Image: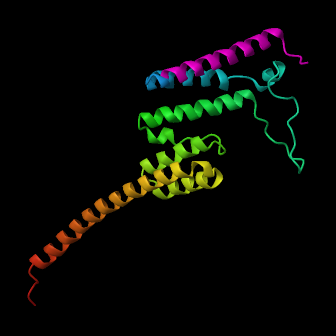
Amino acid sequence: MSDQSPELQSATSMKLATARQKKDTGDQAFKQGNVKGALFSYHEALMYLLGLDKNALESIGIGSAAPPKDKDGKEVKEKTEVDELIEKIYANMSACHMKNENWKRAALAKNENNYKAKFRKGKALGEMGFYEKAVKVLEDVKEKNPSDGAIVDAELARLRVMDNERERVHNQKLKGFLNRADKKATAMPTPAA
């Protein structure tokens, strides 16, 4: 099997079990509307998971000793249960940050194939005012996952309305600024020669 000590195997198993329990606690807190408690639990779960030794994971049956290879013979990074759990936790933390309207943190997407996380990233980018980036991310989600087309279209329409309103306000400010400059120029007498 592996030359890892039983104590290391046991400690790794305990850390993994504790991380799962912390994630479940975070899920329950989020469902109850306790966003702060959910973020705290997710953060604790990450601390347990990010500190795990990949070699120790092999000893308890998670992961393989030799990474798999693709068609070209290049090594492909194998996803372990821990990697998937970390991705889920980051996605859940993103949902918490969206509830708190903390858009910078909500825009994190660890897995480009997680369409829910990419959708949240697009929505957060739009809320921060990065309209073009948001549209690009959301169009990508729509292209790769057509089943979410209606939701993506609704979000794109919402972002267009927001962007048009921002543009209108900006143009109004600019118009007022230019009108003041014109008024000052016409009010000032020209010097006589």
Residue at (86% x, 46% y) in the render? 70
Q: How many marks?
A: 0
Q: Where is residue 104 drawn, in percent x and y?
A: 47, 42
Q: Where is residue 171 drawn, in percent x and y?
A: 29, 65
Residue at (81% x, 18% y) in the render? 60
Dominant SS type (magenta):
helix
Q: Toward which corner of the image does residue 15 lie, by quadrant?
A: top right
On screen, residue 28 versus residue 16, left or right, reads left
The magenta-colored residue range is 1-29
Front-most of residues 148 and 37: 148
Determine if the magenta segment contains residue 18.
Answer: yes
Front-most of residues 116 and 10: 116
Residue at (15% x, 77% y) in the render? 185
Is 83 above or below relative to 117?
Answer: above
User: Which quarter shows the C terminus?
Assistant: bottom left
Is 102 above or below relative to 15?
Answer: below
User: Which quarter shows the N terminus?
Assistant: top right
Front-most of residues 173 and 17: 17
On screen, residue 117 versus residue 130, left or right, reads right
Q: Where is residue 162 drawn, in percent x and y?
A: 37, 54
What colouring method underlies this structural image?
rainbow
Judged from this view, the residue extending furthest toward the top is: 7
Judged from this view, the residue extending furthest toward the bottom is: 193
Q: Toward which corner of the image does residue 52 lie, by quadrant?
A: top right
On screen, residue 138 versus residue 158, left or right, reads right
Residue at (84% x, 11% y) in the render? 5
Determine if the magenta segment contains residue 96.
Answer: no
Front-most of residues 150 and 170: 150
Q: Where is residue 125 drawn, in percent x and y?
A: 48, 49
